[in-house]
Image: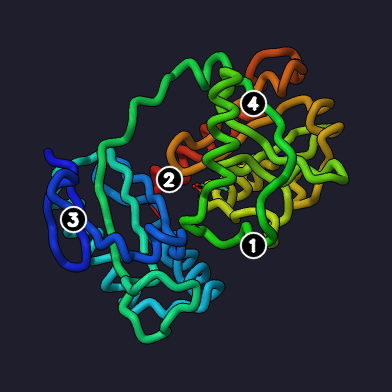
C-alpha cells in the first residue's frame, strides 16, 4: 500500500511531487476541489462529487478539460495502484499556471491534482460520547456553495475550534441564522423535525447531507431544509454535523451550552446507521 499523487498525468509520491510557484491555486486559492471517501476499495458517491466539481467549475467560470469519465478513470487507476482500501481521495483543479496577475487568461490549462491517502484515525469516542463545537461569526463570503480551495476562513474557524478543544466551529450570521460548520453541514432535531440550512449560496451542499436526508426519509423522520437560529441550535433536542470523512457526528455542547441530555441522542445514532446502510448498498 502506498499513498500516491497524480499531478497532470505524472504519478508518484507526495515527497517527489512539485507544482510551479506560479500555480494560481498556490497564489490565489483560484481552484476547486472534492474529497471522496473510499470504503473497502469503492469510492462513495463519486458521481455526486464529480457533478459538484463541475458545478464549482462553472461557478468560477473555469472549463474542465477532462470529462467526468476521464476524471473517474484517473481516480480509479490511482486508487488501484495505491492498494489502499479505506482511503480519502482528494481531487483539486486549479485554474492553471501563469505569471501572477489577478486577471486570468481563459486559455491557460488547469492543473489537475489527485491524491489517495489512508483514512485518518477517527476516534470512536466522537460517536459514543459526542463532541463540543464552538460558534463563530459568519465571516465567509456569499459563494459558499462553491467548493473552492480559498479556505482561509475555514482554516481560521477550525483552528479556533481546536484551540477551544472543540471538534468544529459553526458559523452564525448577524441575524442569528446558523449556516454550517467550517468543513461540515449542521443539523438540529427539535420537536420531532430534523432541520438543516437550505442548499443555497450560504452553504456547501454536502454529499453526506444529501444521503443523511435520504436516510432520514427512509426512517420516517420529518425533515425540513429551512434556516434556524443560534437560539434554536442551543434549544435543540439533538445536534449533529456531517461530512464525508467523519459521516455523522453527534454534538453535545455548543460553546458552554449543553445540548439535550448532554449525551448523543437516538436520532443521530439512527440516522448514522441509516447512512451506513445506504453507503453499504453503494451509490
Ligand atoms: C464548508 C463545508 N460544508 C460542508 C461540507 C460537507 O460536505 P461533504 O458531505 O460533501 O463532505 C464540507 C466538506 O468539506 C465543507 O467544507
Q: Nearer the viewer, residue 25 or 158?
A: 25
Tag 2 residue: 279
Between residues 98 and 195, which one lies in front from this camera angle? 98
Nearer to us: label 3 or label 2: 3
Quarter in which the N terminus is drawn: top left
Q: Which residue is mark 4?
A: 133
**Whether the residue under disc 4 has CB within 8 Å of ligand 1:** no
Q: Earlier in the sequence, mark 1 or mark 2?
A: 1
Residue under numbered circle 3:
78
Residue at horizontal 73 percent and vertical 49 percent from the top: 197
Q: Helix, strand or loop at disc 4? A: strand
Which quadrant of the structure image shows residue 253? Answer: top right
SS under mark 2:
helix
Q: Position of residue 207 (x, y in %)?
A: 52, 52
Percent position of residue 24, x then y: 39, 66
- Coloured how? rainbow
Mark toward the start of the polypeptide (4 vs 2): 4
In the visual, does 29 lie left or right of 239?
Answer: left
Which one is in front in this view, the residue at disc 4 or the one at disc 2? 4
Instruction: Check the image and report above or below for 106 versus 85.
Output: below
Say which residue label 1 marks. Answer: 143
Of circles 1 and 3, the one toward us is 1
Mark 2 residue's CB less than 8 Å from ligand 1: no
Element carrying mark 1? loop
Mark closest to the chain's N terminus, 3 or 4: 3
Amino acid at each position: 500500500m502506498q499513498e500516491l499523487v497524480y499531478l497532470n498525468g505524472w504519478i508518484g509520491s507526495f515527497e517527489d511531487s512539485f507544482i510551479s510557484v506560479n500555480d494560481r491555486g498556490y497564489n490565489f486559492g483560484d481552484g476547486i476541489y472534492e474529497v471522496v471517501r473510499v470504503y473497502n476499495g469503492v469510492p462513495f458517491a463519486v458521481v455526486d462529487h464529480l457533478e459538484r466539481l463541475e458545478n464549482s467549475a462553472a461557478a468560477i467560470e473555469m472549463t474542465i478539460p477532462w470529462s467526468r469519465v476521464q476524471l473517474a478513470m484517473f481516480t480509479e487507476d490511482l486508487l488501484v495502484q495505491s492498494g489502499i482500501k479505506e482511503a480519502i481521495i482528494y481531487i483539486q483543479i486549479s485554474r492553471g499556471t501563469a505569471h501572477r496577475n489577478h486577471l486570468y487568461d481563459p486559455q491557460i490549462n488547469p492543473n489537475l491534482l489527485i491524491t489517495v491517502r489512508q483514512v485518518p484515525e477517527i476516534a470512536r469516542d466522537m460517536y459514543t460520547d459526542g463532541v463540543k463545537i464552538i460558534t463563530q461569526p459568519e465571516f465567509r463570503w456569499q459563494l459558499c456553495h462553491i467548493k473552492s480551495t480559498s479556505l482561509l476562513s475555514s482554516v481560521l474557524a477550525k483552528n479556533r475550534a481546536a484551540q477551544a478543544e472543540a471538534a468544529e466551529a459553526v458559523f452564525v450570521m448577524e441575524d442569528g441564522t446558523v449556516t454550517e460548520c467550517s468543513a461540515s453541514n449542521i443539523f438540529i432535531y427539535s420537536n420531532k423535525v430534523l432541520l438543516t440550512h437550505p442548499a443555497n449560496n450560504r452553504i456547501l451542499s454536502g454529499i453526506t447531507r444529501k444521503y443523511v436526508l435520504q436516510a432520514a426519509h427512509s426512517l420516517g423522520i420529518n425533515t425540513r431544509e429551512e434556516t434556524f437560529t443560534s437560539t434554536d441550535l442551543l434549544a435543540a433536542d439533538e445536534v449533529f454535523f456531517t461530512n464525508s470523512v467523519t459521516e455523522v457526528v453527534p454534538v453535545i455542547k455548543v460553546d458552554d451550552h449543553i445540548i439535550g441530555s448532554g449525551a448523543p441522542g437516538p436520532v443521530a445514532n439512527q440516522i448514522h446507521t441509516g447512512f451506513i446502510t445506504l453507503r453499504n448498498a453503494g451509490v
